[in-house]
């Protein structure tokens, strides 16, 4: 599907797909139908089930005056626009936007497609037609505006819940109440571009983040929702931060009612104890898995670069050795020991990155160095241990994606 509109939220239509049979003559129209069928179905499901906005990254790193307009640098990341299309920024990217007349600027990232590989198209019995693009690459475009984006209204669902309602019944009513108002494709079209942030011009001519600007549009990822739910369940004292009286009145209950309350409290305490135990075991597994995954992937990097660059291979093997040793020593059993082990491992990860320039392809090196820097920021910020484990996993994933600059066969 092409980038025919910058709006989303149009009424859906039935999907049409090819029917294949022996001897069928395939034309460009058939191929376009095949692409539109798969892309259209995926985008419709994404619009109906996923949020719109930034999933990860896409931080605006700088806004600086340039010869023509402003030079805006955006970090790598992923977003979902209101049409259900993924927007991927693979590496830190700098693009020019027009300088506004006023002193406020609001930045957006928009889905775009770029033509690649122009090829000549023969015209039977006549001259050649105009060249056509052989490929389309899905990319992005940075845009700027002088007015803030329209604010999305937070969804509001009003249902009645009785004390004796079963959780499944409440969930059913909640889904039914939210279905109609929040999953309609026939609403007024929405802006498909994803908002990144607002900036203002200082008296000195520089551009800084605008404190009064709306926050960037963040999508609610599975990790975010799971973390919020876990925090809510684990906070048994006052999960809704409800204001209570310093000395609540003494309830007047008969012994029979008190006995029933005690039984319910005992049951809830038992359930809470089981939940906390599962949470502890899950967190321990996550920490151990991150160390084991790091060791395994860096051993693979060491093997891949063994005949290509001995220095990189040696550095990767040292990372694998330290991660495996920390796992065997039980560093993942407790948060404090795990944080200390990752802090020591970070030095080896950074050292491995210093040797990659000129040996691995630059985009893959940049992804690795960004992941190592993000891990360092997470450690220094004293973020929760689960965030440290996730950051370490991203470093290992970036290492697995390193590509050698020259193959062994080419060097031979």
Image (cartoon, grey):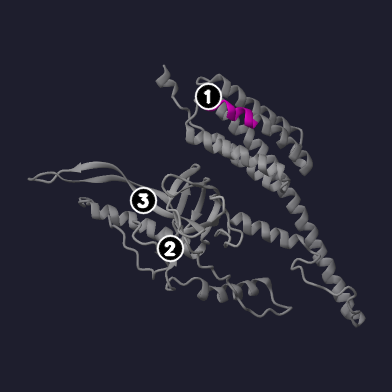
Q: Secondary structure at mark 3?
A: strand
Q: CA distance from mark 1 to mark 2?
A: 43 Å
| Residue on which the image places disc 3 | 113
Q: Position of residue 386 (x, y in %)?
A: 69, 47
Question: Is tag 1's residue or tag 3's residue first in the polypeptide sequence?
Answer: 3
The crowd level at tag 1 (other Cα within 10 Å; few <14, some 14-19, many 20+) is many
Whole-percent x, y for residue 406 in the image: 44, 24
Which of the marked residues, 1 or 2, is nearer the chain's N terminus?
2
Separation (CA) of disc 1 from disc 3: 35 Å
The residue carrying pointer 2 sits among few (fewer than 14), some (14 to 19) or many (20 or more) residues within 10 Å by Cα, namely some
Give the label, 1 or 3, closer to the camera.
3
Name the residue at 66% across, 36% down.
292
Residue indicated by mark 2: 44
Q: Tell me what residue is drawn at x 49 percent, y 64 percent.
A: 147
Image-based side of 349 in relation to 63, left or right:
right
Query: Which residue is at 55% across, 49% downward?
Result: 206
Residue named by callout 1: 305
Looking at the picture, how far across and down is residue 289, in whole percent?
66, 41
Q: Residue furthest left?
A: 125
Q: Residue at x 48, y 56 (%)?
A: 108
Distance, label 3 to label 2, CA atoms, is: 19 Å
Quarter of the rendering occupied by the N terminus: bottom left
Q: Residues within 10 Å of mark 3 (few under 14, many from 20)?
A: some
Dominant secondary structure, magenta: helix
**Seen in the image, is 44 located left or right of residue 18?**
right
**Disc 1 + disc 3, Cβ < 8 Å:** no
Which part of the image, by quadrant, shows the C terminus? top left
The span shown in magenta is 349-357
Q: Nearer the viewer, residue 172 or 21?
A: 172
Q: Are marks 3 and 2 in contact (CB under 8 Å)?
A: no
Up the image or down, 119 lies above or below 322; here it is below
């Amino acid at each position: 599907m092409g980038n025919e509109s910058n709006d989303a939220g149009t009424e859906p239509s039935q999907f049409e797909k090819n029917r294949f049979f022996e001897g069928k003559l395939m034309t460009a129209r058939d191929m376009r139908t095949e692409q539109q069928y798969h892309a259209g179905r995926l985008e419709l499901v994404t619009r109906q089930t996923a949020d719109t906005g930034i999933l990860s990254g896409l931080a605006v790193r700088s806004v600086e005056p340039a010869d023509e307009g402003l030079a805006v640098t955006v970090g790598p990341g992923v977003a979902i626009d209101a049409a259900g299309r993924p927007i991927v920024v693979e590496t830190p990217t700098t693009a020019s936007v027009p300088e506004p007349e006023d002193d406020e600027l609001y930045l957006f990232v928009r889905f775009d497609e770029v033509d690649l590989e122009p090829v000549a198209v023969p015209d039977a019995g006549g001259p050649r037609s105009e060249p056509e693009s052989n490929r389309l690459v899905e990319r992005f475009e940075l845009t700027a505006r002088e007015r803030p984006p329209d604010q999305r209204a937070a969804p509001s669902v009003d249902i009645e819940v009785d004390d004796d309602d079963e959780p499944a019944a409440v969930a059913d009513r909640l889904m039914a109440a939210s279905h109609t108002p929040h999953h309609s494709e026939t609403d007024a079209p929405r802006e498909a571009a994803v908002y990144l942030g607002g900036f203002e011009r200082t008296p000195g001519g520089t551009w800084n983040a605008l404190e009064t600007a709306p926050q960037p549009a963040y999508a609610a990822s599975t990790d975010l929702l799971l973390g919020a739910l876990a925090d809510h369940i684990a906070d048994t004292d006052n999960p809704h931060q409800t204001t209570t009286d310093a000395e609540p009145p003494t309830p007047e209950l008969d012994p029979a009612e008190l006995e029933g309350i005690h039984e319910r409290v005992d049951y809830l305490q038992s359930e809470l104890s089981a939940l906390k135990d599962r949470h502890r075991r899950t967190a321990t597994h996550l920490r151990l898995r991150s160390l084991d995954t790091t060791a395994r992937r860096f051993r693979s990097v060491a093997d891949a670069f063994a005949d290509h660059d001995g220095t990189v291979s040696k550095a990767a093997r040292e990372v694998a050795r330290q991660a495996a040793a920390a796992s065997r020593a039980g560093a993942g059993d407790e948060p404090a020991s795990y944080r200390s082990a990752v802090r020591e491992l970070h030095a080896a990860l950074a050292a491995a990155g210093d040797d990659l320039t000129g040996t691995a392809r630059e985009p893959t090196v940049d992804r690795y160095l960004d992941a190592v820097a993000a891990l360092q920021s997470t450690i220094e910020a004293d973020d929760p241990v689960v965030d440290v484990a996730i950051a370490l996993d991203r470093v290992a994933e970036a290492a697995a994606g390193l590509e050698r600059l020259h193959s062994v066969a080419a060097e031979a």
